[in-house]
Image (spheres, coloured by chain):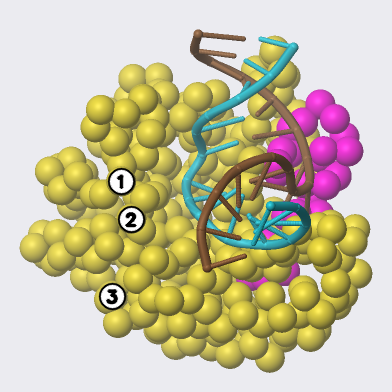
Chain colours: A yellow, B brown, C cyan
Amino acid sequence: MRIGYPCINRTIDCKGDHTFRLHSYTEERLIATVAENLACLQQILAFNLRHELLFFRITSDLVPFASHPVNQFEWQAHFQPQFLEIGQFIAEHGIRISMHPDQFTLINSLDTAVFERSVKELEYHAEVLDLLGVDTSAKIQLHVGGIYGEKGKSMQRFVKRLETLDERLRRRLVIENDDRLYTLRDCLRIHEEIGIPVLFDVFHHEVNSSGETVRDALIMVAPTWAQEDGVPMLDYSSQEPGERARKHAETIDLAHFQQFVETVRDLHLDCDLMLEIKDKEKSAVKAVAVLKEHGFETFY
DNA sequence: CCCTGTCAAGTCACG
DNA sequence: CGTGACTTGACAGGG
């Protein structure tokens, strides 16, 4: 099992998600920012390797305004050598990569302009992964989207829109149960229609589900990942005590995590785990220690 | 240098 | 009807 965390590292003095304001956009600024972000990504991955963290979510801010019309720069060609170098490091060490476009990416929006912008955003995410040269086990995770007053129709619209996408995008996409609108069961129904793997979010399931146990959920989700998709990716977090419902924990709840790990072990489920915990790599390092106590391998 | 209003993008829930 | 939340503060202008 690989353990990972999303997007940024707070330990090393290097942040790979620098951006700037649209009104201060210049090509020079873009080039400088992307160069810095790529250099940081490299450092973060090296840090992760030293701490046996072989799963990482790359920030959507890697290339600011990547899908915005203001950006006419051929960043793909310009930064190809840097992407290639990072990609080689990823391949060499068996690192798994994911990405998670932000809330503005909506396949099933009623507004077709929103859908079209979302496709451009997905193309950007897929380009990053393609430039790294990572295989189809590197995924872009999406939520189903809005409900717009008619859930069934909105799910159908998601399916129909997804069917129109280029295979280069489709092969990367996975759907994740969210914490308010679309449950695991909804995602599984969409999987049955179009075969897209389901990325199971444990915490979202605990606050928004149709009542399945986590154990049963894992059993249902595992077969949605085909050979070429790699082992299932899971998102893990827990409730921050004393805060509003659905707020992610500041730091890992070790008792809760151990219980989850035991469930996974009993099922003999091979999977990769993304820890969506506020203190990021600090909790991820603790999680690695827990896994080792439970006899898991964290290297590939 | 510090302070703080605002930031590309959408949707829903809460008050 | 305005605001906060989402996975995450930090950019940038003005004092």
Give the residue at mark 2: A279
- Residue A34 in the image: x percent, y percent? 68, 76
- Residue A204 in the image: x percent, y percent? 41, 33
Q: Quadrant of residue A232?
A: bottom left
* Label 3 element class: loop
- Residue A32 in the image: x percent, y percent? 71, 81
Residue A52, labelled with which disc? 3
- In the displayed structure, A182 sits above or below A168; it is above
Using the numbered discs, state the Cα–Cα distance from disc 3 to disc 2 in whole angstroms: 17 Å
Give, as a three-letter code, the residue at label 3: Glu
Question: Which one is in front, A162 or C5?
Answer: C5
- In the displayed structure, A5 sits above or below A212; it is below
Residue at 63%, 47% (x, y): give it: A102
Give the residue at mark 1: A250
Instruction: Give, as a single range, the part of the protein colored magenta.
Output: A104-129
Residue at 56%, 42% (x, y): give it: A175
